[in-house]
Amino acid sequence: MTASLLESAIPGVQGLRPYAPGKPLSELEREYGITDAVKLASNENPLGPSKSVLDALQCGYHELARYPDGNGFELKSALAERHDVKAEWITLGNGSNDVLEMVARAFLSPQSSAVFSAHAFAVYPIVTQAIGARSRVAAAHNGRRGPLFGHDLDAMHAQIDADTRVVFIANPNNPTGTWLPHNALRSFIESVPAEVVVVIDEAYFEYVDEEDYPDTSQWVDEFPNLLVTRTFSKAYGLASLRIGYGVSQPILADVLNRVRQPFNVNSFAQLAARAALDDREHLARAVEINRQGMAQLTKGFDELTLPYIPSAGNFISVDVGRDPGTVYEALLHEGVIVRPVDNYGMPGYLRVSIGLEDENRRCLEALGKVLA
Ligand SMILES: *Cc1c(COP(=O)(O)O)cnc(C)c1O
């Protein structure tokens, strides 16, 4: 019975495997009986949300029985001001994943294709294949003319054909942590045909501390086919509430709005995001903790002589030099959850999210023990 219903699903869906999330702490505790585990597996903010977010959430309880504001007026206004655009340029999503899916639903079909890089964020192939569209995957850099595993924009350009309707670029990319500089990215966007939507996924924007790293939300007024996505899940510490957004010209936003679920962003998420946006101090603290944690982890990897891919995000992929599944399992027994990334075509690598100092130390100690 089950098999025949699977055969009834559209071919793209038949070939899909569900997204594999980081193991929740509660699951590790249930399965292994470990009580003081640390989770460095989903690029979450180890500081949690700001105090002003917790205060703002109190207001949400009074409105629990009401549908949320389907147009997200207050939050869109605040975001529009932040990006120096009008509110019609903002599309709110139930996480930025939701916006990526709207793009796929609105622009892809079994007759078209999406282009993205090898080792790119897992959601791009999922949303593409779920529609039955073709994925055209560009080979990544091999470390000679660009960072190892990094997006190769020439190779991506070569994958665009007459059927391509969407190009997905993560800047920086997860799980590689690699990023694209201003001029290269700008020339690429200029070179893409006008009927192809270019999505620049800036989920880790707030963490990047590179002089040549562009804020592409400032380019949308020049490119009608550009959509820039951001999220409150990472640096703002609101992963559980599911809230992200896109910035684009209003014609593109209008197309996305046609496929958007009517009340896709709940009231708590809208309240929390507004409060988070205003608390610049908390954001700065989160970024600083990340900078310190990155230094701590890379120093530790150096001492363990483990190669890693330099990362601009709040995570780092490290080459453990042997079957990463075994190392991952052994780390679980030490109460440390990280993320295997072999399904991203990076054999030998584990991705570690940057945590608080103690959590990073736990991870390094466990790695040292497991690899000894
Ligand atoms: C985490 C992540 C997202 C954000 O997902 P949300 O749905 O906003 O939680 C988007 N893109 C990339 C590359 C990510 O790593």
Image: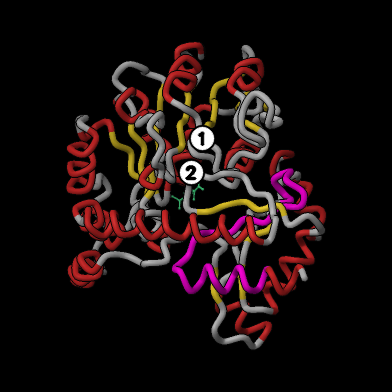
Q: Real-space Cα distance between discs 2 and 1?
A: 7 Å
Left of 215 or right of it: where is 340? right
Indicate the quadrant where residue 272 lies. Answer: bottom left
| Residue 137 appears in the figure | no
Q: Which amino acid, by three-letter code, is at mark 2?
A: Ala
**Dot 2: element:** loop
> Which amino acid type corresponds to the residue marked 1 in the rendered image?
Trp
Considering only vertical position in the picture, is 336 above or below 151? below
Q: In this figure, which residue is indicated by the disc labeled 1? A: 179
Q: Quadrant of residue 335?
A: bottom right
Say if residue 169 shows up in the picture.
Answer: yes
Percent position of residue 15, x then y: 75, 44
Is 91 displayed left or right of 178 in the figure? left
Camera-side residue: 284 or 32? Answer: 284
Give the residue number, with chain letter if any, for mark 2.
Answer: 312
Decide which of 297, 103 is in the foreground and name it.
297
Q: In which quarter of the image is residue 200?
A: top left
Q: Give the range drawn in magenta.
A: 342-367
Asked if the residues shown at circle 2 and circle 1 are in contact, with their CB atoms under 8 angstroms apart, the answer is yes
